[in-house]
Image: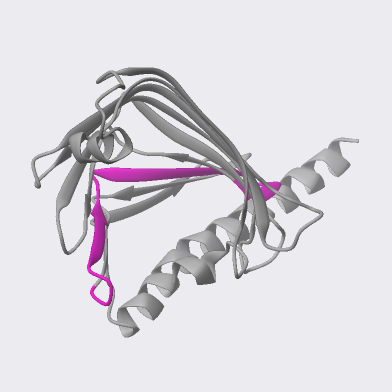
Amino acid sequence: TLIFAAAFAALYATYWVIGAQAARMALPAWAEERRAEGWQVEWQDLRLRGFPSRFDTTLEAPAFADPGTGWAWQAPFLQVFALSYRPNHIIAVWPDEQTVASPYERVTVAAEKMQGSVVFEPGTALTLDRSTFVLDGIRFESSAGWSAAISEGRLATRQTTALEHHHDIGFEANLVRPAEPVLAALDPAEMLPEVIDTMRIDATVGFDAPWDRYAIE
C-alpha cells in the first residue's frame, strides 16, 4: 500500500509539473502570436503556484492593447485559478482598480469585488460553456466626464443547447447609477430616478460564431 501511494504521489507530482510548465509556456506563446499581429501584450511578472491541487497564475501589471481597434486594458494584476484535475474551469480575480481605453475615452473601473467563474468546453479553442460573475461596489469614471456605479451585480451565462451559437444571459444589479448620457438617452422625459433600485435582464442572445478565444483574438 505504501509503495502504491508513493507511486501515485510521484505520478501526480509529475503531472502537476508538466501541467504547470505547459501553462507557464502557453501564455507567453499566445502573447508572441498577438504581438506578431500588432498587439501590445505586456506584463512585469508571471507567477504560477498551487501545487498540488491547483494551477494559480498571477500576472503583475498586465497591459493589453489592440491598435487595430484602439481598445486597451491595463491593471495592477490579474489572477486566474484552476483545479489541476479540471483545468477547463477557471476562477478569475480582478484588482480593485483597472483601466479600459478606447479611441474616444479612458474609463477607470474601481471595484470592491470583481471575480468570475468560467467553464470552457474541453479543447484548445476555449469555447465558453457557462459563466458567473460577481460585481460588487463597481464605480466607473470616464475621461469624457461621466461616471456610473453599481452597488451589487450578478451576471450568469450558459450555452443554449437547442440553438447554435446562442447563450442564455441573466443579469441583476441593485442600486444602479447609470452614466448621465445613458440615462438621458433612456429617459428623455426625465421620469427615472438618478439611482435605480433594481435592474434585471433575462435574455437569449444569438451570435454569428462561437464565443471562444478566436472571437477575442
Percent x, y for residue 213?
53, 66
Please tell me whether the stretch drawn in magenta is mainly helix, strand or loop.
strand
Image quarter of the N terminus:
top right
Q: How is the structure coloured here?
A: one colour
Left or right: 121 with respect to 81? Answer: right
Compared to residue 149, the image places residue 170 above or below, namely: below
- Residue 73 is a magenta residue: yes
Tell which of 23 and 1 is nearer to you: 23
Give the quadrant of residue 131: top right
Left or right: 195 with respect to 215? Answer: left
- Residue 152 is a magenta residue: no
Residue placed at 29% from the left, 29% from the top? 111
Give the quadrant of residue 193: top left
Percent x, y for residue 52?
61, 40
Camera sees residue 130 = no
Left or right: 56 with respect to 162? Answer: left
Give the quadrant of residue 103: bottom left
Residue placed at 80% from the left, 48% from the top? 7
First to last magenta residue range: 67-89
Percent x, y for residue 191?
29, 22
Q: How many marks?
A: 0
Compared to residue 61, the image places residue 39 above or below, namely: below
